Amino acid sequence: MGKLLNILSIAVILLAVFIAAPRFSSNVPITPLDSTSLEGQTLVITGGTSGVGREAAIKLAGRGATLIITGRSQSRASKTVLSLPIFSAATPHAGLQLDLTDPESIETFTSTIKKLPRIDAIVLNAGMMYGPDYTGPFQTSKFPGGPVDTMIASNHLGSFKILHDMMSTFESQGTRIVFVSSISHHLGTPDLLSNTANPTGGSEGSPLSISQSLSAFALYGQTKLFNVLSANKLSKLLPNCPVTVVTPGFCATTIGNMDRTPGIFNPLEYVPFTFTAEQGGDLLVAALQIEPIAGKMLQPYWIWESVPLLKGRLKGAFFNIIQEMIFQKLVPSGMYLHTQSEAALDEELQERAWEWSKGMIGA
């Protein structure tokens, strides 16, 4: 009984703090434009067949934009395209197959979009997370730099190769670039370049153990830190291109649940405070309207940036577990620009990550 009272007391204190702290915060929500017409604009969204990417595509197409969306399956990409509103028969939407773990697939994709008259914006949304019974592949050897973890390839290297191959095109057209990252990038650490081949230790054909699943969650944070490091470096290399980092919050999507065995318990499915995929899509749309601010990330709820006594991964765990999984719908919602992690703002680490990534794609 005593332990239960202690737990309840801590919960009450935390709740009181989260109600009070935002009232003293100088970080206030921003208001992006609401219904600006996008007719005549061509937008590319990777990972547009499900989740927040699909919801964003529906909203953007509904405002007149011409959409190029991608999916790992050509059939799913084509099917999704048919569900999007079309404003002009002369510029129909297109669905393209794209496997971010396969350089050849990426090159086919970039050679196709280079033929477009113009690309007004690209949203780098596609990615993955190892689910509770994911059985591989945990490693790919398709990149010139050697074996690399599949999640690193999918969440970072594939998008990096798209950017690298398209840099001159984007620079000449002033293309807006949106990186879909996560609050979990705060879990990333400066050692993110070590042991990139198979950090979880997962063996092909076997689900991850509990300890390996925790490692996989930390790895997901590392891949999202790669996203933010790339965004910060790219904003310096392409000053003509607005670069924005967006973290959609904890949304009820299929990420981490692909190819699952029916009946496998996933505790995340029982967390009651998730945002909907549509709410996450709203944030991606907003990211295409706001002016980016260096070192900031757009997200749908207030976070306690100056939480005392916590730094590094402890602060990242606080943001992920306390702020996002438990309290994201209990603190003020809206569209906030929050400060990125210390590691993400480290210019030396930005450079190291950029050069490592170039080596991995053979640039």
Image (cartoon, rainbow, N blue to C red):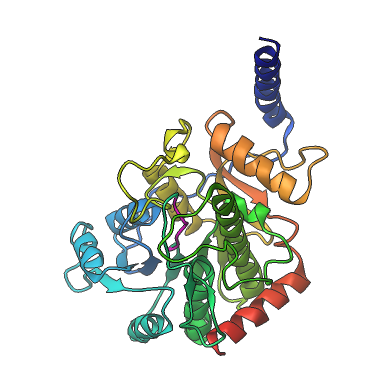
Question: Where is residue 108 shown, x and y percent of the image?
Answer: 35, 85
Residue placed most toward the observer, 255 or 243: 255
Does 77 sit left or right of 266 as displayed? left
Residue 255 percent location from the top left of the image: 41, 52
Residue 291 visible at all = no
Judge whether residue 180 can be spotted in this image.
yes
Give the left or right position of residue 110, taking residue 212 as reference.
left
Question: Looking at this rendering, what residue extends furthest in the top direction?
Answer: 1
| Chief secondary structure of the magenta portion | loop
Specify start and end residues of the magenta stretch as a single range: 126-131
Residue 168: horizontal and vertical position, in percent?
52, 86
* Above or below, 58 relative to 201: above
Task: For the N terminus, give its image quadrant.
Answer: top right
Residue 228 lies in magenta, yes or no? no
Count of numbered circles in the view = 0
Front position in the image: 89 or 168: 168
